[in-house]
Image (cartoon, helix red, strand yellow):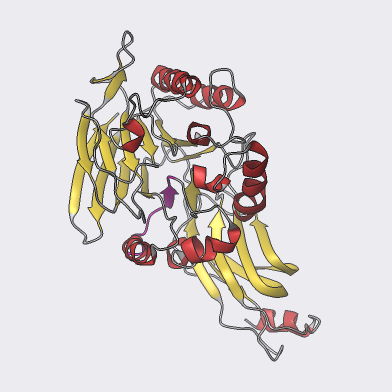
Amino acid sequence: MKRLFFILLLTPVFAASATITRGVYVEDPTQTTATFRIRTSEPTPLWLEYGPSPTCSQIMTLSPEATEHRILVHGLVPNKEFCYRAYVLNEAKDGVQEPVGGKFKTLYTPERKELKFIIFGNTAGAANDESRALLAAKLETHNPDFFIHTGDLVSNGLDVDADHEFFVPFQHVLAKAPMFIAVGEKEYGINNDAKETRATFAANYKKAHTMTWGKGTPNYYYFDSANARVIFLDTSLAAGKGSAPSFAKESEQYKWLRTSLATTESGKWKIVVLHNPLRSTGVSGLVDDEHPKDPVIEQAEKDLLVLLEYYGVNVVLQGHDSNYERTFTMMRNKESDEGEESEKGIVFLTFGTGASEELTKRVVEKPWTARFVSAQVYGEVEIVDRRFSLKVYNMEGKLLDNVDIMY
């Protein structure tokens, strides 16, 4: 702390007193780096201390005067928990305010065969404060390596509402572990026009989130940790969002996915995360004369399923539908394109009830559904070697599903 106050003596005096209004949250951890995101009420310099837990003050870095602070730190080590504290000046400019702190874990090296994460989705909805508070309170009781969000962070996609609907209610969750997000259609705003959705996404979601770098970041990307490759796709085109990247065969996203799957090391879990479900008996599974599916999207989904099956994807995590659903391990019937239970194939898990205004009832009957629940839920996953253990809880802490998936 003496070092911090010495730096303060050399810092110019600023007229306004700033406070931290968003964050600190960590995104895009790798084995050796991490990105810190912080927003302040006024332009201010910001000091970040961090180090291996429990020594949070091993290293200090200064972020220049700004309201949006994005700090990329290097020199971390894999398989390690780090803690941090962020400081801004106090009102008198003779010291600092109480720090805002948290922790995160760097990604694991391949020889480690254990991984823990939490899955949930849909935190959008202006009137869902109680649902968000319940969910946040439950998530805070866990200590995962990271969180996975299956999309739809904010109801209208606008940054002006992101604090109320996401960053404030989940601030203590974000302080416990990094969060990886699958882009949902709400991230593109309320309209479908290509120009408007592109502008909304760029000015709001893209400015606030840093996902692991790749050709399609932040729409689609992947990371490796322990014995798993986790791949995130953007399927918002299925919801009509005009500027969302195509996932049709021969599209850039499809080609990228094919390469990402083909280059996955043998023996790794292949986990794909997307927002719009590929297999569902909820609302998105309702296809009839009154709810026809766009034939172009329907073909793209079929081609995507073929690709996932061909490269041996183990689990697909989905959002959008406001229910929890788990399928049996299933494969496509090549003649009908209908899914059928199989010893080898993909398990589809739908988590879309994070803070839903209305829950989805099961609208179609399929023999491949192993469990369907209309309730606000989240999932806890522990991977140990070739076992993927899933526990699903409601907001009263009741265990609703408990299953082991073997690879």
- Location of residue 256 (image quadrant): top right
On the question of residue 53 being in view, the answer is no
Residue 326: image x %, image y %? Answer: 26, 36
Residue at the limit of the structure toward the front, as seen here? 290
- Location of residue 292 (image quadrant): top left
Q: Is residue 145 magenta?
A: yes
Please give left or right for residue 183 compared with residue 112 in the image: right
Residue 31: image x %, image y %? Answer: 54, 47
Q: Quadrant of the C terminus?
A: top left
Residue at the limit of the structure toward the top, as seen here? 335
Please give left or right for residue 145 compared with residue 384 in the image: right
On the question of residue 218 being in view, the answer is yes
- Location of residue 344 (image quadrant): top left
Viewer-closest of 120 and 129: 129
Question: Is residue 405 placed above or below 47 in the rendered structure?
Answer: above
Q: Is residue 371 magenta?
A: no
Q: Quadrant of the N terminus?
A: bottom right
Which residue is found at the position 33% from the left and 25% from the top? 288
Viewer-closest of 384 and 307: 307
The secondary structure making up most of the magenta span is: loop
Please give left or right for residue 28 compared with residue 124 in the image: right
Residue 310: image x %, image y %? Answer: 41, 17
Residue 203: image x %, image y %? Answer: 67, 52
Which residue is found at the position 61% from the left and 25% from the top? 252
Q: Which residues are magenta?
A: 140-150
Viewer-closest of 15 and 115: 15
Viewer-closest of 53 and 336: 336
Which residue is found at the position 30% from the left and 19% from the top? 331
